[in-house]
Amino acid sequence: MLAAGFDGFLGKPYSREQIFDYIAQHLGVRYVYRAGSEKTDGHLPLRPEDLATIPARLREELENAVISLNPQRIMAAVRQVSEHDATVGNVLKRFAGEYTYTPILDALQRCEKRSTQASP
């Protein structure tokens, strides 16, 4: 693979941080992060604790929809969440309406990680 021009390999599952690290390593870019910012691109933040109030079945459906990158499926899952919690649904609707899926997936995965850590 190296002889064919590959500079490296990143196996699945990979994190967003790993991808950015590879980009920095191979392209020589540096990232500048703002400290203490609670807003994401003008949106209200989507916190894991907000999603924790949603039934696990709905969180799983939303996560699977986001992973599928199918806008209709994502909006259908967001509508279901809105029926359970309108405030969280509105935040999700704004992200999904702009095809900004990463914050949704990040919050879902952090919510899952917290619930897994809380379980014995």
Image: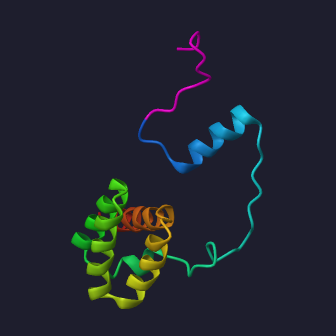
In screen coordinates, is 100 left or right of 89?
right
Colouring scheme, one of rainbow, by chain, secondary structure, one colour: rainbow
Q: Residue at x 26, y 66 (%)?
A: 61
Q: Residue 59, percent across and down?
A: 30, 70
Kindly indicate the quadrant of the structure image that contains residue 44: bottom right
The magenta stretch spans residue 59: no
Q: Nearer the viewer, residue 109 or 64?
A: 64
Which secondary structure type mostly characterizes the magenta part of the structure? loop
Q: Could you tell me if residue 119 is visible in this image?
A: no
Note whether 73 is above or below 69 in the view shown: below
Q: Nearer the viewer, residue 8 or 118?
A: 8
Kindly indicate the quadrant of the structure image that contains residue 18: top right
Q: Residue at x 55, y 78 (%)?
A: 45
Q: Nearer the viewer, residue 41 or 85?
A: 41
Note whether 79 is above or below 117 in the view shown: below
Q: Quadrant of the C terminus?
A: bottom left
Q: Residue 27, percent across and down?
A: 73, 35
Q: Residue 97, percent across and down?
A: 45, 73
**In the image, farthest residue toward the top:** 3
Q: Residue at x 27, y 73 (%)?
A: 76
Q: Could you tell me if residue 117 is visible in this image?
A: yes
Q: Residue at x 40, y 68 (%)?
A: 111
The residue segment tinted magenta is 1-11
Q: Residue 1, percent across and down?
A: 52, 14
The magenta stretch spans residue 9: yes
Q: Nearer the viewer, residue 82 or 49?
A: 82
**In the image, farthest residue toward the bottom:** 86
